[in-house]
Image (cartoon, coloured by chain):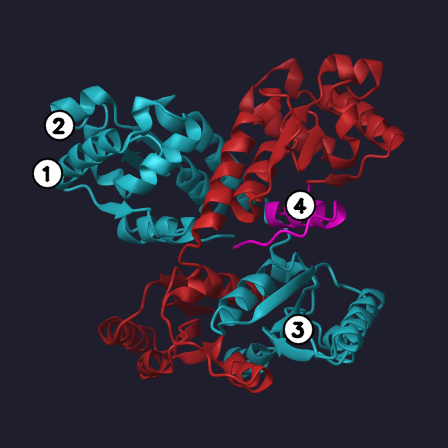
Chain colours: A red, B cyan
Amino acid sequence: MRRTVFYISDGTGITAETIGHSVLTQFEGIDFETFRVPFVDSDDKAEVAANRIRACHERTGMRPIVVNTIMDQRLSDIVADGGGLMLDVFAPFIGPLQDELGMPRSSRVGKAHGLTNFAEYEARINATNYALSHDDGIDVRYDDAEVILVGVSRVGKTPTCLYMALHYGVKAANYPLTEEDLEKLELPARLRPYKSRLYALSIDAQRLAQVREARRPGSQYATLAQCRRELDLAEKLFRRDGIPMQSTTNTSIEEIASKILSQLGIEKHMF
Amino acid sequence: MRRTVFYISDGTGITAETIGHSVLTQFEGIDFETFRVPFVDSDDKAEVAANRIRACHERTGMRPIVVNTIMDQRLSDIVADGGGLMLDVFAPFIGPLQDELGMPRSSRVGKAHGLTNFAEYEARINATNYALSHDDGIDVRYDDAEVILVGVSRVGKTPTCLYMALHYGVKAANYPLTEEDLEKLELPARLRPYKSRLYALSIDAQRLAQVREARRPGSQYATLAQCRRELDLAEKLFRRDGIPMQSTTNTSIEEIASKILSQLGIEKHMF
Protein backbone atom coordinates (compact mmCIF):
# COMPACT_ATOMS: atom_id res chain seq x y z
CA MET A 1 0.00 0.00 0.00
CA ARG A 2 1.24 3.42 -0.94
CA ARG A 3 0.12 6.77 0.49
CA THR A 4 1.21 10.30 -0.27
CA VAL A 5 2.18 12.69 2.51
CA PHE A 6 2.66 16.45 2.26
CA TYR A 7 4.67 18.31 4.89
CA ILE A 8 3.32 21.85 4.74
CA SER A 9 4.90 24.72 6.63
CA ASP A 10 5.15 28.50 6.72
CA GLY A 11 8.85 27.97 7.53
CA THR A 12 11.39 25.32 6.60
CA GLY A 13 9.11 22.32 7.03
CA ILE A 14 11.62 20.62 9.30
CA THR A 15 9.23 20.43 12.23
CA ALA A 16 6.43 19.07 10.08
CA GLU A 17 8.73 16.45 8.63
CA THR A 18 10.16 15.44 11.99
CA ILE A 19 6.74 14.93 13.48
CA GLY A 20 5.33 13.26 10.42
CA HIS A 21 8.24 10.86 10.29
CA SER A 22 7.79 9.96 13.94
CA VAL A 23 4.09 9.26 13.60
CA LEU A 24 4.22 7.49 10.26
CA THR A 25 6.92 5.03 11.33
CA GLN A 26 4.27 3.74 13.74
CA PHE A 27 2.37 2.33 10.78
CA GLU A 28 4.22 -0.58 9.28
CA GLY A 29 3.98 -1.98 5.78
CA ILE A 30 2.85 1.23 4.15
CA ASP A 31 5.03 2.90 1.60
CA PHE A 32 4.75 6.63 2.31
CA GLU A 33 5.76 8.93 -0.52
CA THR A 34 6.54 12.28 1.07
CA PHE A 35 6.84 15.85 -0.21
CA ARG A 36 8.04 18.93 1.64
CA VAL A 37 6.19 22.15 0.84
CA PRO A 38 8.06 24.85 2.80
CA PHE A 39 7.57 28.63 3.10
CA VAL A 40 3.81 28.66 2.58
CA ASP A 41 3.38 32.16 3.97
CA SER A 42 0.83 33.79 1.67
CA ASP A 43 -2.66 33.09 0.30
CA ASP A 44 -1.19 32.39 -3.14
CA LYS A 45 1.26 29.82 -1.87
CA ALA A 46 -1.44 28.20 0.27
CA GLU A 47 -3.61 27.85 -2.82
CA VAL A 48 -0.78 26.32 -4.80
CA ALA A 49 -0.32 23.80 -1.98
CA ALA A 50 -4.06 23.05 -1.90
CA ASN A 51 -4.04 22.46 -5.65
CA ARG A 52 -1.13 20.05 -5.36
CA ILE A 53 -2.99 18.09 -2.71
CA ARG A 54 -6.17 18.04 -4.83
CA ALA A 55 -4.30 16.93 -7.94
CA CYS A 56 -2.57 14.17 -6.04
CA HIS A 57 -5.90 12.97 -4.68
CA GLU A 58 -7.34 12.81 -8.19
CA ARG A 59 -4.30 11.07 -9.60
CA THR A 60 -3.95 8.41 -6.91
CA GLY A 61 -7.57 8.03 -5.88
CA MET A 62 -6.48 8.23 -2.21
CA ARG A 63 -6.65 11.35 -0.15
CA PRO A 64 -3.18 12.61 0.81
CA ILE A 65 -2.08 12.95 4.40
CA VAL A 66 -1.13 16.53 5.26
CA VAL A 67 1.12 17.27 8.23
CA ASN A 68 0.68 21.00 8.69
CA THR A 69 2.71 23.39 10.84
CA ILE A 70 1.29 26.66 9.50
CA MET A 71 0.34 28.82 12.49
CA ASP A 72 -2.01 31.19 10.68
CA GLN A 73 -5.50 29.73 10.71
CA ARG A 74 -6.57 31.47 7.50
CA LEU A 75 -3.67 29.94 5.55
CA SER A 76 -4.31 26.53 7.11
CA ASP A 77 -7.95 26.74 6.04
CA ILE A 78 -6.90 27.40 2.44
CA VAL A 79 -4.61 24.35 2.52
CA ALA A 80 -7.39 22.28 4.10
CA ASP A 81 -9.59 23.07 1.08
CA GLY A 82 -7.28 20.76 -0.87
CA GLY A 83 -9.12 17.86 0.75
CA GLY A 84 -6.25 16.01 2.45
CA LEU A 85 -6.39 14.44 5.89
CA MET A 86 -5.22 17.47 7.87
CA LEU A 87 -2.98 16.80 10.84
CA ASP A 88 -2.43 20.23 12.39
CA VAL A 89 0.60 20.24 14.66
CA PHE A 90 0.38 23.61 16.37
CA ALA A 91 -3.28 24.59 16.13
CA PRO A 92 -4.46 22.33 19.00
CA PHE A 93 -2.02 24.00 21.40
CA ILE A 94 -2.85 27.62 20.74
CA GLY A 95 -6.23 27.66 22.52
CA PRO A 96 -5.09 25.90 25.72
CA LEU A 97 -1.96 28.07 25.90
CA GLN A 98 -3.93 31.29 25.38
CA ASP A 99 -6.21 30.25 28.25
CA GLU A 100 -3.33 29.20 30.47
CA LEU A 101 -1.21 32.29 29.85
CA GLY A 102 -4.12 34.70 29.72
CA MET A 103 -3.03 36.37 26.51
CA PRO A 104 -3.58 35.99 22.77
CA ARG A 105 -0.75 34.62 20.68
CA SER A 106 1.25 37.18 18.76
CA SER A 107 0.64 36.98 15.06
CA ARG A 108 4.10 37.87 13.89
CA VAL A 109 4.79 35.55 11.00
CA GLY A 110 8.03 33.62 10.77
CA LYS A 111 8.98 33.93 14.41
CA ALA A 112 7.93 30.38 15.05
CA HIS A 113 10.54 28.88 12.86
CA GLY A 114 13.58 30.41 14.40
CA LEU A 115 14.15 33.32 12.06
CA THR A 116 17.42 34.11 13.46
CA ASN A 117 18.20 35.30 16.86
CA PHE A 118 21.62 36.65 16.12
CA ALA A 119 23.35 35.72 19.37
CA GLU A 120 22.21 32.14 18.95
CA TYR A 121 23.29 32.00 15.33
CA GLU A 122 26.70 33.25 16.34
CA ALA A 123 26.98 30.73 19.18
CA ARG A 124 26.27 27.92 16.74
CA ILE A 125 28.77 29.18 14.18
CA ASN A 126 31.44 29.68 16.83
CA ALA A 127 30.82 26.22 18.22
CA THR A 128 31.05 24.76 14.72
CA ASN A 129 34.38 26.49 14.16
CA TYR A 130 35.51 25.21 17.54
CA ALA A 131 34.55 21.64 16.64
CA LEU A 132 36.42 21.91 13.33
CA SER A 133 39.58 23.30 14.91
CA HIS A 134 39.48 20.78 17.78
CA ASP A 135 38.63 17.80 15.63
CA ASP A 136 40.73 14.67 15.74
CA GLY A 137 43.37 16.08 18.07
CA ILE A 138 44.31 18.97 15.73
CA ASP A 139 44.23 21.57 18.50
CA VAL A 140 44.53 20.02 21.94
CA ARG A 141 44.00 23.10 24.12
CA TYR A 142 40.76 22.10 25.79
CA ASP A 143 40.18 24.94 28.25
CA ASP A 144 37.06 26.11 26.44
CA ALA A 145 35.69 22.66 25.65
CA GLU A 146 32.32 21.80 27.17
CA VAL A 147 32.64 18.20 26.04
CA ILE A 148 35.63 16.19 24.85
CA LEU A 149 34.76 12.98 23.06
CA VAL A 150 37.32 10.19 23.22
CA GLY A 151 37.46 6.93 21.35
CA VAL A 152 39.32 5.00 18.69
CA SER A 153 39.43 6.12 15.08
CA ARG A 154 36.09 6.03 13.13
CA VAL A 155 33.85 5.50 16.11
CA GLY A 156 31.68 8.53 15.26
CA LYS A 157 33.33 11.35 17.21
CA THR A 158 33.43 13.98 14.48
CA PRO A 159 29.79 13.91 13.36
CA THR A 160 28.67 13.89 16.97
CA CYS A 161 30.79 16.95 17.79
CA LEU A 162 29.54 18.80 14.72
CA TYR A 163 25.96 17.93 15.57
CA MET A 164 26.30 19.23 19.14
CA ALA A 165 27.87 22.41 17.79
CA LEU A 166 25.33 23.08 15.05
CA HIS A 167 22.32 22.22 17.17
CA TYR A 168 23.11 23.23 20.64
CA GLY A 169 26.00 25.66 20.21
CA VAL A 170 28.04 23.35 22.46
CA LYS A 171 31.82 23.54 22.12
CA ALA A 172 32.79 19.94 21.58
CA ALA A 173 36.32 18.72 20.94
CA ASN A 174 37.39 15.20 20.16
CA TYR A 175 40.51 13.22 20.81
CA PRO A 176 41.32 9.97 19.00
CA LEU A 177 43.08 7.49 21.27
CA THR A 178 46.48 6.65 19.84
CA GLU A 179 48.22 3.30 19.76
CA GLU A 180 50.43 4.61 22.54
CA ASP A 181 47.48 5.57 24.76
CA LEU A 182 46.02 2.11 24.24
CA GLU A 183 49.26 0.31 24.98
CA LYS A 184 49.89 2.25 28.15
CA LEU A 185 46.22 1.79 28.99
CA GLU A 186 46.00 5.28 30.34
CA LEU A 187 44.47 8.60 29.49
CA PRO A 188 46.97 10.94 27.88
CA ALA A 189 48.22 13.56 30.35
CA ARG A 190 46.68 16.39 28.38
CA LEU A 191 43.17 15.02 28.89
CA ARG A 192 43.45 14.40 32.64
CA PRO A 193 42.72 17.98 33.77
CA TYR A 194 39.39 17.83 31.93
CA LYS A 195 38.19 14.49 33.18
CA SER A 196 34.71 15.70 34.13
CA ARG A 197 34.12 16.79 30.55
CA LEU A 198 35.22 13.55 28.91
CA TYR A 199 32.75 11.26 27.24
CA ALA A 200 33.68 8.02 25.52
CA LEU A 201 32.23 6.53 22.35
CA SER A 202 32.50 2.90 21.44
CA ILE A 203 31.01 0.72 18.71
CA ASP A 204 30.53 -2.90 17.79
CA ALA A 205 33.81 -4.33 16.40
CA GLN A 206 32.16 -5.71 13.29
CA ARG A 207 30.61 -2.36 12.44
CA LEU A 208 33.89 -0.59 13.01
CA ALA A 209 35.65 -3.01 10.67
CA GLN A 210 33.02 -2.29 7.99
CA VAL A 211 33.39 1.47 8.38
CA ARG A 212 37.18 1.31 8.26
CA GLU A 213 37.14 -1.09 5.33
CA ALA A 214 35.06 1.40 3.34
CA ARG A 215 37.66 4.02 4.15
CA ARG A 216 40.87 2.04 3.67
CA PRO A 217 40.07 -1.18 1.84
CA GLY A 218 42.31 -4.13 2.65
CA SER A 219 44.25 -2.33 5.37
CA GLN A 220 45.44 -3.85 8.62
CA TYR A 221 43.62 -0.94 10.28
CA ALA A 222 40.29 -2.30 9.00
CA THR A 223 40.72 -5.93 10.09
CA LEU A 224 38.26 -7.29 12.60
CA ALA A 225 41.11 -8.43 14.87
CA GLN A 226 42.61 -4.94 14.97
CA CYS A 227 39.22 -3.30 15.63
CA ARG A 228 38.47 -5.79 18.39
CA ARG A 229 41.80 -5.23 20.06
CA GLU A 230 41.54 -1.43 19.99
CA LEU A 231 37.95 -1.43 21.25
CA ASP A 232 38.73 -3.87 24.06
CA LEU A 233 41.64 -1.77 25.28
CA ALA A 234 39.74 1.49 24.93
CA GLU A 235 36.72 0.19 26.83
CA LYS A 236 38.96 -1.16 29.56
CA LEU A 237 40.58 2.26 29.87
CA PHE A 238 37.20 4.05 29.99
CA ARG A 239 35.84 1.70 32.65
CA ARG A 240 38.92 2.01 34.79
CA ASP A 241 38.86 5.79 34.67
CA GLY A 242 35.11 5.97 35.16
CA ILE A 243 34.47 7.81 31.90
CA PRO A 244 30.84 7.57 30.79
CA MET A 245 30.57 5.60 27.59
CA GLN A 246 28.02 5.03 24.89
CA SER A 247 27.91 2.72 21.93
CA THR A 248 27.15 4.31 18.58
CA THR A 249 26.26 1.01 16.91
CA ASN A 250 22.49 1.24 16.82
CA THR A 251 22.02 4.83 17.73
CA SER A 252 21.20 7.91 15.70
CA ILE A 253 23.42 10.98 15.90
CA GLU A 254 20.55 12.87 17.57
CA GLU A 255 20.28 10.25 20.25
CA ILE A 256 24.00 10.05 20.94
CA ALA A 257 24.23 13.84 21.27
CA SER A 258 21.16 14.05 23.44
CA LYS A 259 22.43 11.36 25.82
CA ILE A 260 25.84 12.97 26.15
CA LEU A 261 24.39 16.37 27.02
CA SER A 262 21.91 14.85 29.41
CA GLN A 263 24.57 12.74 31.18
CA LEU A 264 27.06 15.60 31.44
CA GLY A 265 24.30 17.87 32.76
CA ILE A 266 24.57 20.40 29.92
CA GLU A 267 21.19 22.15 29.67
CA LYS A 268 21.63 23.95 26.37
CA HIS A 269 18.83 24.69 24.03
CA MET A 270 18.62 24.44 20.36
CA PHE A 271 17.53 27.85 19.25
CA MET B 1 5.99 36.68 34.12
CA ARG B 2 7.87 33.40 34.33
CA ARG B 3 6.58 29.93 33.47
CA THR B 4 8.25 26.54 33.60
CA VAL B 5 8.12 24.20 30.62
CA PHE B 6 9.05 20.51 30.54
CA TYR B 7 9.87 18.80 27.25
CA ILE B 8 9.10 15.16 27.90
CA SER B 9 9.96 12.42 25.45
CA ASP B 10 10.53 8.69 25.18
CA GLY B 11 13.42 9.57 22.84
CA THR B 12 15.82 12.48 22.62
CA GLY B 13 13.28 15.22 23.31
CA ILE B 14 14.35 17.11 20.20
CA THR B 15 10.91 16.99 18.61
CA ALA B 16 9.23 18.12 21.82
CA GLU B 17 11.66 20.99 22.17
CA THR B 18 11.35 22.05 18.54
CA ILE B 19 7.58 22.19 18.72
CA GLY B 20 7.51 23.78 22.14
CA HIS B 21 9.92 26.47 21.02
CA SER B 22 7.81 27.24 17.96
CA VAL B 23 4.59 27.54 19.92
CA LEU B 24 5.99 29.39 22.91
CA THR B 25 7.68 32.10 20.82
CA GLN B 26 4.13 33.06 19.85
CA PHE B 27 3.59 34.34 23.38
CA GLU B 28 5.61 37.45 23.97
CA GLY B 29 6.79 38.92 27.23
CA ILE B 30 6.83 35.63 29.14
CA ASP B 31 10.09 34.25 30.42
CA PHE B 32 9.90 30.50 29.82
CA GLU B 33 12.27 28.36 31.85
CA THR B 34 12.63 25.08 29.99
CA PHE B 35 13.81 21.59 30.95
CA ARG B 36 14.37 18.61 28.68
CA VAL B 37 13.41 15.24 30.13
CA PRO B 38 14.50 12.70 27.50
CA PHE B 39 14.31 8.90 27.34
CA VAL B 40 11.17 8.49 29.46
CA ASP B 41 10.54 4.93 28.32
CA SER B 42 9.45 3.09 31.47
CA ASP B 43 6.88 3.46 34.23
CA ASP B 44 9.61 4.38 36.69
CA LYS B 45 10.98 7.17 34.55
CA ALA B 46 7.47 8.47 33.86
CA GLU B 47 6.86 8.64 37.61
CA VAL B 48 10.11 10.51 38.17
CA ALA B 49 9.02 13.01 35.50
CA ALA B 50 5.57 13.37 37.09
CA ASN B 51 7.17 14.04 40.46
CA ARG B 52 9.40 16.72 38.99
CA ILE B 53 6.35 18.41 37.47
CA ARG B 54 4.45 18.18 40.75
CA ALA B 55 7.39 19.56 42.78
CA CYS B 56 7.80 22.46 40.37
CA HIS B 57 4.10 23.26 40.63
CA GLU B 58 4.33 23.35 44.42
CA ARG B 59 7.49 25.43 44.40
CA THR B 60 6.36 28.04 41.87
CA GLY B 61 2.62 28.03 42.55
CA MET B 62 2.02 27.85 38.79
CA ARG B 63 1.29 24.68 36.91
CA PRO B 64 4.08 23.78 34.52
CA ILE B 65 3.52 23.46 30.79
CA VAL B 66 4.35 19.98 29.52
CA VAL B 67 5.12 19.40 25.85
CA ASN B 68 4.92 15.64 25.54
CA THR B 69 6.03 13.41 22.66
CA ILE B 70 5.68 10.05 24.40
CA MET B 71 3.72 7.74 22.10
CA ASP B 72 2.66 5.17 24.70
CA GLN B 73 -0.62 6.27 26.24
CA ARG B 74 0.05 4.51 29.56
CA LEU B 75 3.33 6.37 30.07
CA SER B 76 1.73 9.66 29.02
CA ASP B 77 -1.02 9.11 31.59
CA ILE B 78 1.56 8.64 34.34
CA VAL B 79 3.26 11.90 33.32
CA ALA B 80 -0.12 13.66 33.19
CA ASP B 81 -0.68 12.70 36.85
CA GLY B 82 1.99 15.29 37.63
CA GLY B 83 -0.68 17.93 37.07
CA GLY B 84 0.97 20.02 34.33
CA LEU B 85 -0.83 21.51 31.32
CA MET B 86 -0.35 18.57 28.97
CA LEU B 87 0.28 19.38 25.32
CA ASP B 88 0.43 15.99 23.62
CA VAL B 89 2.12 16.23 20.25
CA PHE B 90 1.52 12.82 18.73
CA ALA B 91 -1.53 11.48 20.52
CA PRO B 92 -4.10 13.54 18.53
CA PHE B 93 -2.80 12.08 15.26
CA ILE B 94 -2.88 8.41 16.14
CA GLY B 95 -6.66 7.98 16.02
CA PRO B 96 -7.24 9.77 12.69
CA LEU B 97 -4.32 7.91 11.12
CA GLN B 98 -5.54 4.54 12.37
CA ASP B 99 -8.93 5.26 10.82
CA GLU B 100 -7.44 6.55 7.59
CA LEU B 101 -4.97 3.71 7.12
CA GLY B 102 -7.26 1.02 8.48
CA MET B 103 -4.69 -0.46 10.84
CA PRO B 104 -3.58 -0.03 14.44
CA ARG B 105 -0.28 1.66 15.13
CA SER B 106 2.60 -0.64 15.88
CA SER B 107 3.67 -0.40 19.48
CA ARG B 108 7.36 -0.91 18.99
CA VAL B 109 9.03 1.53 21.33
CA GLY B 110 11.82 3.79 20.17
CA LYS B 111 11.10 3.50 16.46
CA ALA B 112 9.52 6.90 16.41
CA HIS B 113 12.66 8.73 17.29
CA GLY B 114 14.83 7.45 14.53
CA LEU B 115 16.66 4.68 16.31
CA THR B 116 19.04 4.20 13.59
CA ASN B 117 18.34 3.01 10.17
CA PHE B 118 21.84 2.01 9.28
CA ALA B 119 21.85 3.04 5.63
CA GLU B 120 20.67 6.50 6.59
CA TYR B 121 23.23 6.83 9.35
CA GLU B 122 25.93 5.90 6.90
CA ALA B 123 24.66 8.37 4.29
CA ARG B 124 24.83 11.16 6.85
CA ILE B 125 28.32 10.20 7.99
CA ASN B 126 29.56 9.90 4.41
CA ALA B 127 28.04 13.25 3.53
CA THR B 128 29.67 14.81 6.59
CA ASN B 129 33.04 13.42 5.57
CA TYR B 130 32.42 14.73 2.08
CA ALA B 131 31.63 18.22 3.41
CA LEU B 132 34.78 18.20 5.51
CA SER B 133 37.03 17.10 2.67
CA HIS B 134 35.41 19.53 0.20
CA ASP B 135 35.31 22.48 2.58
CA ASP B 136 36.81 25.79 1.61
CA GLY B 137 38.27 24.60 -1.67
CA ILE B 138 40.42 21.86 -0.07
CA ASP B 139 39.37 19.22 -2.57
CA VAL B 140 37.95 20.71 -5.76
CA ARG B 141 36.83 17.55 -7.54
CA TYR B 142 33.12 18.17 -7.57
CA ASP B 143 31.78 15.23 -9.59
CA ASP B 144 29.93 13.80 -6.61
CA ALA B 145 28.71 17.11 -5.21
CA GLU B 146 24.96 17.59 -5.05
CA VAL B 147 25.39 21.24 -4.08
CA ILE B 148 28.39 23.57 -4.32
CA LEU B 149 28.08 26.70 -2.24
CA VAL B 150 30.01 29.72 -3.45
CA GLY B 151 30.65 33.03 -1.75
CA VAL B 152 33.30 35.21 -0.18
CA SER B 153 35.12 34.20 3.00
CA ARG B 154 32.99 33.96 6.21
CA VAL B 155 29.62 34.19 4.56
CA GLY B 156 28.36 31.00 6.21
CA LYS B 157 29.24 28.31 3.69
CA THR B 158 30.82 25.76 6.01
CA PRO B 159 28.06 25.50 8.65
CA THR B 160 25.45 25.31 5.90
CA CYS B 161 27.29 22.47 4.15
CA LEU B 162 27.71 20.58 7.41
CA TYR B 163 24.07 21.06 8.27
CA MET B 164 22.91 19.73 4.90
CA ALA B 165 25.23 16.75 5.33
CA LEU B 166 24.25 15.89 8.88
CA HIS B 167 20.55 16.39 8.35
CA TYR B 168 19.81 15.40 4.86
CA GLY B 169 22.81 13.29 3.91
CA VAL B 170 23.40 15.72 1.04
CA LYS B 171 26.92 15.91 -0.35
CA ALA B 172 27.68 19.62 -0.21
CA ALA B 173 30.98 21.19 -1.18
CA ASN B 174 31.93 24.82 -0.87
CA TYR B 175 34.21 27.09 -2.79
CA PRO B 176 35.41 30.44 -1.48
CA LEU B 177 35.73 33.03 -4.23
CA THR B 178 39.31 34.24 -4.45
CA GLU B 179 40.57 37.74 -5.06
CA GLU B 180 41.43 36.60 -8.57
CA ASP B 181 37.90 35.30 -9.25
CA LEU B 182 36.48 38.61 -8.06
CA GLU B 183 38.85 40.72 -10.12
CA LYS B 184 38.19 38.75 -13.29
CA LEU B 185 34.51 38.85 -12.38
CA GLU B 186 34.07 35.31 -13.59
CA LEU B 187 33.43 31.88 -12.23
CA PRO B 188 36.60 29.83 -11.96
CA ALA B 189 36.86 27.31 -14.77
CA ARG B 190 36.65 24.38 -12.39
CA LEU B 191 33.17 25.39 -11.26
CA ARG B 192 31.67 25.93 -14.70
CA PRO B 193 30.89 22.28 -15.50
CA TYR B 194 28.74 22.13 -12.35
CA LYS B 195 26.75 25.31 -12.88
CA SER B 196 23.37 23.74 -12.20
CA ARG B 197 24.56 22.68 -8.75
CA LEU B 198 25.95 26.04 -7.70
CA TYR B 199 24.25 28.12 -5.05
CA ALA B 200 25.53 31.48 -3.84
CA LEU B 201 25.49 32.87 -0.32
CA SER B 202 25.79 36.52 0.46
CA ILE B 203 25.45 38.62 3.63
CA ASP B 204 25.07 42.21 4.73
CA ALA B 205 28.48 43.97 4.56
CA GLN B 206 28.25 45.28 8.11
CA ARG B 207 27.58 41.80 9.48
CA LEU B 208 30.43 40.34 7.45
CA ALA B 209 32.80 42.98 8.82
CA GLN B 210 31.73 42.06 12.38
CA VAL B 211 32.26 38.36 11.77
CA ARG B 212 35.67 38.90 10.17
CA GLU B 213 36.70 41.37 12.88
CA ALA B 214 36.00 38.73 15.53
CA ARG B 215 38.23 36.37 13.59
CA ARG B 216 41.09 38.69 12.62
CA PRO B 217 40.85 41.86 14.69
CA GLY B 218 42.17 45.00 13.02
CA SER B 219 42.89 43.32 9.70
CA GLN B 220 42.35 44.86 6.27
CA TYR B 221 40.28 41.74 5.57
CA ALA B 222 37.76 42.81 8.21
CA THR B 223 37.27 46.43 7.13
CA LEU B 224 33.81 47.48 6.01
CA ALA B 225 35.24 48.83 2.75
CA GLN B 226 36.87 45.50 1.92
CA CYS B 227 33.74 43.53 2.79
CA ARG B 228 31.57 45.85 0.71
CA ARG B 229 33.87 45.59 -2.28
CA GLU B 230 34.03 41.78 -2.17
CA LEU B 231 30.29 41.40 -1.70
CA ASP B 232 29.47 43.84 -4.52
CA LEU B 233 31.73 42.01 -6.94
CA ALA B 234 30.51 38.60 -5.85
CA GLU B 235 26.85 39.53 -6.18
CA LYS B 236 27.49 41.05 -9.60
CA LEU B 237 29.15 37.80 -10.67
CA PHE B 238 26.26 35.67 -9.32
CA ARG B 239 23.65 37.80 -11.02
CA ARG B 240 25.46 37.77 -14.32
CA ASP B 241 25.84 34.01 -14.28
CA GLY B 242 22.29 33.44 -13.05
CA ILE B 243 23.37 31.60 -9.91
CA PRO B 244 20.59 31.51 -7.30
CA MET B 245 21.59 33.52 -4.25
CA GLN B 246 20.46 33.88 -0.68
CA SER B 247 21.46 36.25 2.08
CA THR B 248 22.44 34.66 5.38
CA THR B 249 22.06 37.91 7.35
CA ASN B 250 18.77 37.31 9.13
CA THR B 251 18.31 33.67 8.40
CA SER B 252 18.79 30.58 10.50
CA ILE B 253 20.96 27.72 9.26
CA GLU B 254 17.86 25.53 9.00
CA GLU B 255 16.17 28.04 6.79
CA ILE B 256 19.16 28.59 4.52
CA ALA B 257 19.59 24.84 4.05
CA SER B 258 15.91 24.27 3.45
CA LYS B 259 15.71 27.03 0.81
CA ILE B 260 18.78 25.75 -1.02
CA LEU B 261 17.44 22.21 -1.25
CA SER B 262 14.02 23.41 -2.25
CA GLN B 263 15.37 25.74 -4.98
CA LEU B 264 17.76 23.15 -6.38
CA GLY B 265 14.96 20.59 -6.39
CA ILE B 266 16.72 18.17 -4.06
CA GLU B 267 14.00 16.08 -2.40
CA LYS B 268 16.03 14.42 0.33
CA HIS B 269 14.64 13.46 3.65
CA MET B 270 16.07 13.78 7.04
CA PHE B 271 16.01 10.26 8.34
- Tell me whether circle 4 and circle 2 mark residues in contact (CB < 8 Å): no
Q: Which of the two labelled residues, at mark 1 and mark 2, occupies the earlier sequence position?
A: 2
Mark 2 belongs to which amino acid?
A: Leu
On the rendered structure, is B44 left or right of B53? Answer: right
Mark 1 belongs to which amino acid?
A: Arg
Residue B61: x, y in percent?
Answer: 74, 79
- Tell me whether circle 1 and circle 2 mark residues in contact (CB < 8 Å): yes
Q: Secondary structure at mark 3?
A: strand
Compare residues B8 and B264 and report the one nearer the observer. Answer: B8
Mark 3 belongs to which amino acid?
A: Val
Report which residue position mark 4 lands on.
A256
1 and 3 marks on the same chain = yes
Q: Secondary structure at mark 2?
A: loop
Q: Which of the two labelled residues, at mark 2 and mark 3, occupies the earlier sequence position?
A: 3
Report which residue position mark 2 lands on.
B185
Q: Chain of mark 1?
A: B
Q: Is the residue A254 above or below the residue A225 in the image?
A: below
Measured Cα–Cα span from mark 2 to mark 3: 55 Å
On the rendered structure, is A31 left or right of B235? Answer: right
Mark 4 belongs to which amino acid?
A: Ile
Q: Dot 1 surroundings within 10 Å: few (below 14), some, or many (20 or more)? A: few
